[in-house]
Amino acid sequence: MTTKKETVISIGDSISYKYEDKNYGRAEFVVCPVFKRGIMRECYIYPMQQPEYFEKYFKIDLSGRKTRVISLSSHPPFEADPRVWMMFWCKEHKCFSFELYVADNTARLEIDYHFGDTLCLDFKGRSKYG
């Protein structure tokens, strides 16, 4: 995974994707939350099965935050939450990572922050701007 180009994103940013691709199937993400002494220091997101992102990955800027929790969700009208289907040890980041399928019929992954310590990965539809 290290041959890809890193793109730093901030809280409030989002990653657009196609829910399904006829050649690659359903979109997936690998998430690597790196914790040190109970605080998330880094979080990496690798798009999978998405041709537009074959050459890059995302690092969330968590500077100045004491993040202890990561949550995954989608909101109405989307009925199913994203589905984690595999957890594994990431040798590169030395952390437990997980791979997930995106929620049904969603179009973007929005990075948010709640409750003073929770990094939220919210799967949503298209924005009203496109």
Image (cartoon, rainbow, N blue to C red):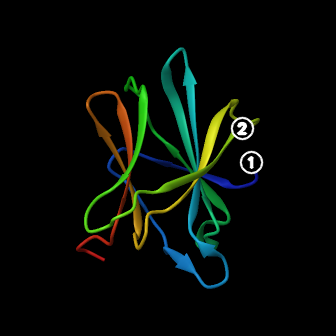
**16 or 80: which is nearer to us?**
80
On the picture, is 26 further left or further right than 92? left
Image-quadrant location for residue 96: top right
Q: Which residue is drawn at 40% across and 65% down?
A: 108
Is 46 or 80 nearer to us in this picture? 80
- Asked if residue 7 is positioned above or below residue 92 in the image, the reply reads below
Residue 46, position as x, y percentages in the image: 61, 53
- Quarter containing the C terminus: bottom left
N-terminal-most mark, 2 or 1: 1
Point 33% across, 69% down: residue: 125
Q: Which residue lies furthest to the top in this view?
A: 37
Q: Is disc 2 placed on a helix, strand or loop? A: strand
> Label 1, on which residue?
2
How far apart are the two marked residues, 2 and 1, measured between alpha carbons?
Answer: 12 Å
Compare residues 75 and 66 and report the one nearer the observer: 75
Q: Position of residue 88 (x, y in %)?
A: 70, 40
Toward which corner of the image does residue 92 lie, by quadrant? Answer: top right
Kind of residue sitting beneath label 2: Cys
The amino acid marked with disc number 1 is Thr
Instruction: Provide residue 101's location: percent of width, then percent of height.
Output: 54, 61
The local secondary structure at tag 1 comes to loop
For disc 2, the marked residue is 90
Q: Of residues 88 and 67, which is closer to you in this image?
A: 88
